[in-house]
Amino acid sequence: MIRAVIIDDERLARNELKKLLQDFPEIEVIAEAANAAEGIEKVDSLNPDLIFLDIQMPGKTGFDMLAELERAPNVIFTTAYDEYALKAFEVNALDYLLKPVEPKRLADALQKLQVEEDKDPISDHTISVNRSILNEHDQVFVKDGERCWFVKLSDIRLFESVGNYAKVYFGPNKPLILKSLNALEERLDEKVFFRANRKHIVNLRLIEKIEPYFNGGLLLEMKGGEKIEVSRRQTVKFKEMMSL
Amino acid sequence: MPKSGSKYYWWCQIGGWSFLALVIVLSAFTSFEQRITDKLIFNTLIVATSGLISTHIFREIIRQRGWMQMPVDKALPKFLIGIFLTCIAGSLIRILIGDLLKGFLNPVSPLKNADFTGRIVAMTAEYGLMIIPWTLIYYVYHYIDKYSKQQLDTLKLEALVKELELKTIKAHINPHFIFNALNSIRALIDENPGRARTAVTELSNILRSSMQAEKLETVTFEKELNIVKDYLALEHIRFEDRLQVEYEIDEDTLDQPIPPMMLQTLVENAIKHGISRQVDGGKVKIVSDFKDDYHELVILNTGVLNGNRNKDGFGLASTQNRLQILFGQKANFNIREVNGNTVEARVLIPVDLTK
């Protein structure tokens, strides 16, 4: 059973989607929201597997809403006519539906979602341990200006502190997000993400090389070629973690 | 540059120099000598012919070097040197032709080569009196010609741009609106079939009028208002309680002409930038009345004016243009924020009292 939330500012549009979803018994619509603020509240409290999200909404757009979520669920965008907004997603294989929604397209989108879930079965049982800690299979939504990405935490190799922002390194991209490194550290799984120094958090699974450095510190080379120094104090911790 | 040059050139050249020759001969007759001698006619003909030949050479140089295409400050020194050289050339040709002909007609008499430099200087000065006006006339004629051609081109271009702009504005109906409306109607089919039926009619009215709008310069305010009412009724299905609509229409303004789809575009903006951004929605109010000699249309909506996005927006910038193309400079359009939470778009169209 996939638990879904519909977020759209038009009641009729929500009703129409609910009606279409009646043909898919595996989808259970557990809540609706009429704007981004309500949406955030519902997603945070109900932790759905899937959201149907309208892009144009009063107050905040669907993109803004996603950027504010701690953990991005699977998202299917619904929009009447937003070619430009959807272009932001060309880099990500992510689905969207044009209103009025064609039932066949809806079936395809849900099918695609099912395939993704099967590939990655751990992701829908994240509720187990501690909800506030992000699992490496969780995905986050990153928005930097006009560009948007859904990123699996396991694909992020490095967080770098830049003033009040953090630069997120994944693939060839390094967008900025408005979060402090300390706040991120609290939310990240410490088995995977390691605070190398004051300015950097590294993904332990994406280290290419480890070399000794001055003063008994270490120098890590990440898969993307970035060289990160591990402070002396953290080096002790790092060695502890890595040794048997 | 056209190879052929002006078709009037030879007429002006021959006519001008003949006229000059005639004046010299006549003035000689009326003033001191009181008679026309063969020698005078002969000399005058040589003066005119040499002048014609030298200025023709001058003209060829001007055309080949493209002096007329240069800016004035660059062309001026070239023209001054050109005039001077043309005067000398004219004098030389005159002496050459004169001496040749004299030698030919009177082979017996010895050639008077005495004081060659003196003659050249005197003749150059004399030609200066003729060639400076010649150059002025030539320059002014071509300058005006060039200028009017440029103006014509600019006008043609402006007209084209205006036509294109008008076409684009008229055809402008937001696809976002159409698909949202269709989506709402599909939901209504089960929920409220009666309302769904009227909604289809309303949507067809809007689509039809937006298609017809391309053919028309103006429509009556009444027609446009009906479209806007249909449009707002459809948006009301979408927004439900979030959209309130109010009309304040002076019945006498219903016959006034307005550009098709103009009010529609403004109301669409009021929804798009105003109501749809408010979580709790808001109100759209349309006012139409006479104010002095103007038909005044005001569209008020809840919201704030989003500086750069609104003012430079295609719809708003072109509304002003379109009004002035159709109703002249007195027509006016402006948009501003009042009371902090309302945006007011105001259109003033001068009333044609002759109708």
Image (cartoon, helix red, strand yellow):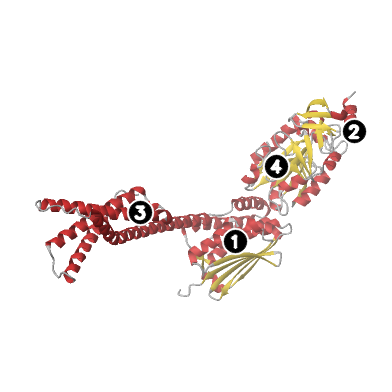
Q: How much space separates mark 4 and mark 1, taking CA atoms?
A: 32 Å
Q: Is residue B254 above or below residue A152?
A: below
Q: Chain of mark 3?
A: B
Identify the residue at horizontal 81%, vertical 42% (top origin). A47
Q: Nearer the viewer, mark 3 or mark 2?
A: 3
Residue B218 seen in the figure = no
Would residue B156 be found to the left or right of residue A172 on screen? Answer: left
- Report which residue position mark 2 lands on: A233
Q: Amino acid at mark 2?
A: Arg
Furthest residue to the front? Answer: B114
Q: Secondary structure at mark 2?
A: helix
Secondary structure at badge 4 equals strand
Which secondary structure lies at badge 1? helix
Instruction: State the residue at coordinates (78%, 51%).
Output: A38
* Numbered mark located on residue B81 in the image: 3
Label 4: which residue? A148
The answer as to whether the residues below labels 4 and 3 share one chain is: no
Per the model, the C-alpha gap separating discs 3 and 2 is 87 Å
Whichever of callouts 1 and 3 sits on the residue coming sooner in the sequence is 3
Badge 1 is on which residue?
Answer: B266
